[in-house]
Image: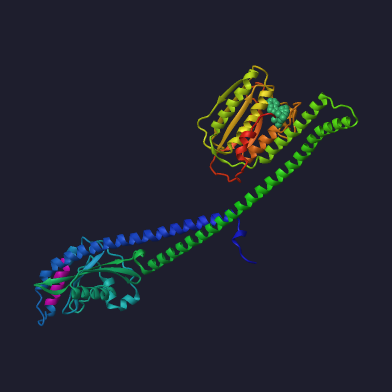
């Protein structure tokens, strides 16, 4: 069975990507902060060792100057005295530097002199004294020497009282002498690491040896394996980042695919809804067209039999033809309802215009028209002529329902939570009876003798084509009347509709007469 990310639930993929990303970031941060910490401690170790070593070099130079020069060699006694005197001075200096040991390396005899260790708490050795240490004279010295005990170094054991680090110190001191410069290194000395500082000591213009200081580092961040650990952690972190990026990319692809699929399904649903509505509409059309046709047919049959035509039957015939024409004109509006070019527009401008037109219609009826606009409304995606048509259908219905002296109110509001703009047409007429309410938006549903029952159906179609809605409620203030509300989404995601060449005609078609 082929593995596919698509089989894993989206929430699990999201969780895994977020977890991997967070873990990778944490790991990178830890690696980075370890590196910074390491550098900071390295710098402070260097400055400690340099301060201690500088003091050692300064105080030891005059003692070293008293040693006989090559080819003369100091006697063992002389050597031992110098060693002890230097060790005492050094011990006094190193007292102020916790965990630091140091001394001198004499060039001509390639020997260590004046080793001393800090008198603070004893620096922790990176290893416990073992049987192996007992067998190794250098290690034995290192583990036997307590910082409180005075250095008891003889000529024969002029090796530094250290363990394997002696070799590292020697290499470092020798390099400082040869290059005549101060050197600082941190070197692995398993199981820990040592930091060594070395500086050439000059007597009368001649380099006689080197002063050195050393401190042991058992801190894991100085160990090679910690570096390896950091590298592995950084590698893992980068791997995690790459994986979480891949997961996120795959997620984005899935989400995009799902969105396309959802849009396709929605479009299909809308299409089948419209097909169902069209079926109903056609049934209504057939019914509506049959009535005038039957009227026309019976008039013509009468004429065939020699009865008429009289002026009255001509009038009837013309009225039936007008009725048919009215139905055809309204049907055309239906077909155009979803072919609007939607642009960002100001709903207030549209409602103000409808208010102006309604006032002209209302005046002879002695109906008062009021317009109340909400200035805070953002732009909505709409076809202004189509929205004018919706609102005019509503105001015409209201004016037809209102008695003389009634009032019609147009208002706009913004609902910031739903991110929609509302346009309301409110009248204080008789209101919509309960049994009418459920059929109100059905094509050809009318309670008026000359009505087509298409006004509200078309208005709702236009609202749906705007991804909005059209609804009706009773008045909330307890008065009789109807409240029709057109809801249009705020223009945030512009909707691409096929621009219609007929769009400009809507203004002309936005006539009233329902
Ligand atoms: P028509 O106006 O041709 O009847 P409409 O679709 O515009 O078609 O309206 C359908 C029906 O809704 C009307 O016949 C009427 O009964 C009812 N109606 C619409 N508006 C109102 C209103 N403001 N007050 C009361 N009834 C209304």
Depicted 96 relative to depicted 151: above or below: above
- The residue most toward the right is 305
Count of marks placed on residues: 0
Q: Is residue 114 left or right of residue 475?
A: left
Depicted 484 relative to depicted 224: above or below: above
The span picked out in magenta is 78-89
Q: Is residue 17 left or right of residue 123?
A: right
Q: Quadrant of residue 425?
A: top right
Q: Is residue 68 magenta?
A: no
Q: Is residue 215 visible?
A: yes
Q: Quadrant of residue 315?
A: top right
Q: Main secondary structure of the magenta part?
A: helix
Q: Which quarter is ligand 1 in?
A: top right
Q: Residue at position x 59%, y 31% from top?
A: 423
The image shows residue 26 at horizontal and vertical percentages of 44, 57
Q: Nearer the viewer, residue 124 or 391?
A: 391
- The residue most toward the bottom is 71
Q: Nearer the viewer, residue 390 or 232?
A: 390
The image shows residue 164 at horizontal and vertical percentages of 29, 75
Q: Quadrant of residue 51?
A: bottom left
The image shows residue 317 at horizontal and vertical percentages of 80, 29
Q: Residue at position x 10%, y 73% from top?
A: 205
The image shows residue 55 at horizontal and vertical percentages of 16, 64
**Colour mapping used in the image:** rainbow
Q: Residue at position x 65%, y 31% from top?
A: 511
Depicted 368 relative to depicted 131: above or below: above
Q: Nearer the viewer, residue 274 or 489?
A: 274
Q: Is residue 94 visible?
A: no
Image quarter where the C terminus lies is top right
Image quarter where the N terminus lies is bottom right
């Amino acid at each position: 069975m082929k593995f596919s990310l698509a089989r894993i639930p989206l929430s699990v993929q999201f969780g895994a990507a977020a977890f991997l990303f967070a873990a990778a970031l944490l790991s990178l941060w830890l690696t980075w902060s370890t590196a910074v910490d390491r550098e900071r401690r390295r710098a402070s170790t260097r400055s400690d060792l340099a301060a201690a070593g500088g003091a050692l070099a300064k105080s030891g130079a005059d003692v070293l100057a008293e040693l006989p020069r090559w080819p003369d060699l100091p006697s063992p006694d002389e050597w031992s005295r110098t060693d002890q005197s230097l060790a005492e001075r050094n011990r006094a200096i190193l007292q102020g530097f916790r965990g630091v040991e140091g001394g001198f390396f004499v060039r001509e005899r390639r020997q260590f002199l004046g080793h001393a260790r800090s008198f603070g708490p004893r620096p922790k050795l990176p290893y416990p004294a073992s049987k192996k240490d007992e067998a190794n004279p250098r290690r034995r010295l290192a583990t036997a020497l307590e910082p409180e005990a005075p250095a008891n170094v003889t000529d024969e054991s002029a090796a530094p009282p250290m363990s394997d680090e002696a070799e590292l110190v020697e290499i470092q001191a020798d390099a400082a002498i040869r290059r005549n410069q101060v050197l600082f290194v941190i070197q692995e000395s398993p199981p820990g690491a040592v930091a060594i500082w070395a500086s050439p000591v000059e007597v009368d213009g001649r380099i006689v040896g080197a002063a050195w200081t050393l401190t042991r580092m058992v801190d894991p961040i100085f160990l090679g394996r910690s570096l390896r650990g950091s590298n592995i952690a950084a590698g893992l972190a980068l791997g995690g980042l790459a994986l979480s990026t891949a997961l996120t990319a795959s997620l984005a692809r899935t989400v995009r695919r799902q969105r396309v699929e959802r849009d396709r399904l929605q479009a299909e649903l809308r299409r089948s809804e419209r097909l169902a509505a069209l079926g109903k509409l056609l049934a209504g059309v057939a019914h509506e067209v049959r009535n005038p046709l039957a009227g026309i047919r019976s008039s013509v049959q009468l004429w065939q039999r020699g009865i008429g035509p009289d002026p009255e039957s001509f009038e009837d015939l013309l009225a039936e033809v007008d009725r048919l024409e009215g139905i055809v004109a309204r049907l055309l509006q239906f077909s155009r309802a979803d072919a609007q070019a939607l642009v960002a527009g100001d709903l207030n401008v549209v409602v103000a215009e409808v208010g102006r037109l309604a006032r002209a219609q209302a005046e002879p009826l002695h109906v008062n028209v009021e317009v109340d606009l909400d200035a805070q409304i953002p732009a909505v995606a709409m076809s202004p002529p189509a929205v004018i048509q919706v609102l005019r259908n509503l105001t015409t219905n209201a004016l037809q329902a209102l008695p003389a002296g009634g009032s019609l109110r147009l208002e706009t509001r913004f609902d910031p939570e739903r991110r929609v703009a509302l346009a309301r047409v409110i009248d204080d007429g008789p209101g919509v009876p309960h049994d009418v309410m459920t059929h109100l938006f059905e094509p050809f549903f009318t309670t008026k003798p000359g009505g087509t029952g298409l006004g509200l159906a078309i208005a709702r179609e236009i609202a749906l084509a705007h991804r909005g809605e059209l609804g009706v409620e009773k008045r909330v203030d307890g008065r009789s009347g109807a409240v029709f509300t057109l809801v249009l989404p705020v223009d945030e995601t512009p909707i691409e509709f096929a621009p219609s060449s007929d769009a400009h005609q809507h203004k002309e078609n936005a006539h009233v007469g329902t």
